[in-house]
Image (cartoon, rainbow, N blue to C red):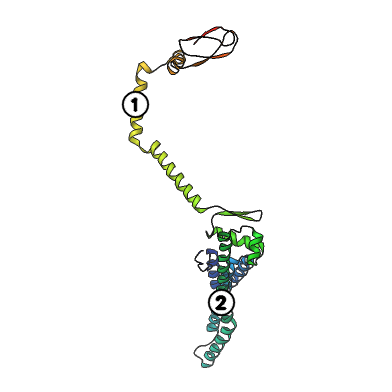
Amino acid sequence: MEDHLPYKSKYSKFDRVILTLAFILYPVGLLMTLFRVLTTHVHHSRKGRNHRLIGWVWVYAYILIMGLFILAFDLDNPEDVQLYWDSAWLYGVILLIPAVSFFILGSHADSKFSLLLHQYYHLVMKRRIREIDHIAVETKQSPNHVIRDLDFMITEHMLPFGRIQNGILELESEEYHEAYDDDYDDDYDEEYVDEYGDEEYEHEEYEYDDEEYEDEEYEYVDEEYADEYDESEDRGGGPRSIECPSCGAKTVVYADVERECDYCGNVISA
């Protein structure tokens, strides 16, 4: 969008189905075209496409009529041949000139919308204007049109990811999301490889666990021994907070060292 690339609306799959029906079964295709135009023409992004759809309907009408004339006229008769060509010119003026006009209108609508997209981008990304009403005033569009156009730009990745809430466009930085996604993927891959990827290491660890628990000497640990071990081995000779059995005050005492309580004078040992 910074280089102001020209916008051109594209046909969707449903549009191609409509054009195919208009060529094969003209009345059905004509009704679907009208319905498509009436329901979507409010969107600036679809005006050019809708004009071209109508233009193709006019072209198909001309082809259909000329095909019927071929079946109706005797082309071996010079008078019928002359009548056929006169009719071709007449219906060409009636049908093909409007078709060309709609194609021109479609290109003009796309060019106009392209300029509008460039204006939106400049207001939002360069001038940092995010209020819908303010953007509507700057672009001379209605707020509803601005909302539809900005939603289109976000969907088509012409603007960073965001949403419109309470009349304000809230955008999030694309660089932030890309960096976050890359870091998350790298961390996840490393954790996955470290924990699950090395099958050989996992197998060796499993064998080590089997050997450890198959040894009868370490197969069973008494709970009383575990408690005793926690109090003596882990704590070592460091200071401990002991509650005085006489007054209940807490006093810091080192292992194998007796100390008098600071409050009642009672002798305390760890």
Q: Position of residue 157 (x, y in %)?
A: 52, 58
Q: Residue at x 63, y 65 (%)?
A: 138
Determine which of the numbered discs, if any, sits on residue 208 in the image: 1
Q: Are marks 2 and 1 in contact (CB under 8 Å)?
A: no
Q: Earlier in the sequence, mark 2 or mark 1?
A: 2
Q: Position of residue 168 (x, y in %)?
A: 63, 55
Could you say which is closer to the camera, residue 39 or residue 181?
181
Q: Position of residue 98 (x, y in %)?
A: 59, 79
* Residue 61 visible somewhere in the drawing: no
* Vertical arrangement, residue 43 with respect to residue 261, above or below: below
Could you say which is closer to the camera, residue 85 or residue 158?
158
Q: Tag 1's secondary structure? A: helix
* Vertical arrangement, residue 180 with respect to residue 241, above or below: below
Residue 151, by quadrant, is bottom right
* Residue 13 visible somewhere in the drawing: yes
Could you say which is closer to the camera, residue 147 or residue 222?
147
Q: Residues within 10 Å of mark 2 (few under 14, many from 20)?
A: some
Q: Residues within 10 Å of mark 1 (few under 14, many from 20)?
A: few
Q: Residue at x 33, y 30 (%)?
A: 204
Residue beneath disc 2: 104
User: Is 207 placed left or right of 163 in the picture?
Assistant: left
How many marks do you count on the picture? 2
User: Is 136 placed left or right of 212 in the picture?
Assistant: right
Mark 2 to mark 1 CA distance (whole Å): 79 Å
Determine which of the numbered discs, if any, sits on residue 232 in the image: none
The three-letter amino acid code for the residue at tag 2 is Ile
The three-letter amino acid code for the residue at tag 1 is Tyr
